Amino acid sequence: MKTDDKTLIAKVLIENDNHAFELLVKKYQSLIRRYFLHQTLDDEALSDDLAQDTFIKAYTNLAKFQSLSSFSTWLYRIAYNTLCDHIRKKEIMESYNKNIAANINIQVDDISKDIEQKYDVFNALQILKENERTCITLFYMEDLSLEIISEITEMPQNTVKSHLTRGKTKMAEWLKNKGYGRN
């Protein structure tokens, strides 16, 4: 029998049932980890750390969940804030992008065409501003609606649309210059 999120949350809060929280983690860990993989441009170790931080924050703040949105939206919001906190604390964005680009350039020579295309998309993501990358990732890679993205990022829907449009345009131009395009 599958238990819904609200029931699991109630078990954690009322009965101090850690197994119920484990079930929530199992249900959402791949989504949250995938979100971080896209945001960190496939840095698995950092993604795992950020995902772990997200679930720790979710557990310690579970009593603050008010069911105004779905649990997954609330969890994505925590993930988004965790990433923003990480970037602010470490101030690594510029050096991080340079390191990723160097690593990608080294690896591209040894990978297949499909993998090379994946890295080209990650390289294209690097040219975007943080908010554009976040909106592109959540909309196209996580398949979330504008409404949910707006809720997660606390940006108006029109701002999310603007970030999507600008991000798409920048990525399309970068990929076109890289040799991709419609024939």
Image (cartoon, rainbow, N blue to C red):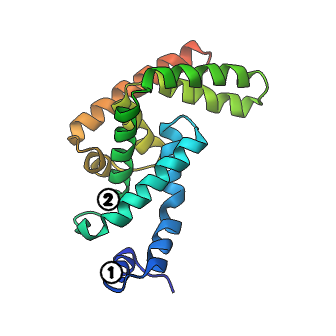
Give the amino acid type for the residue marked by disc 2 in the picture: Trp
Picture disc at residue 124: none
Return the disc, 1 or 2, that comes first in the chain's sequence.
Answer: 1
What x and y, as percent, mark residue 108?
Answer: 72, 23
Q: On the image, numbered disc 1 is attached to which residue?
A: 10
Circle 2 SS class: helix
Residue 42 in sight in this render = yes
Q: Residue at x 47, y 48 (%)?
A: 50
Q: Could you say where residue 99 lies in the image, as x and y percent from the top left?
A: 57, 22
Q: In which image quadrant can residue 66 be found?
A: bottom left
Q: At x 24% / y 66%, what residue is drawn?
A: 64
Q: Is residue 155 above or below residue 105?
A: below
Which residue, given by chain and number where applicable, does mark 2 sit on? 74
Report helix, strand or loop for mark 1: helix
Real-space CA distance between mark 1 and mark 2, rounded to the nearest whole angstrom = 16 Å
The residue under the point 35% across, 39% down is 84
Find the residue positioned furthest to the top: 177
Q: Position of residue 11 (x, y in %)?
A: 37, 83
Q: In the visual, does 68 lie left or right of 29?
A: left
Does residue 135 appear left or right of residue 178 in this picture?
A: left
Q: Residue at x 76, y 21 (%)?
A: 109
- Observer-side mark, 1 or 2, equals 1
Residue 42: quarter of image: top right
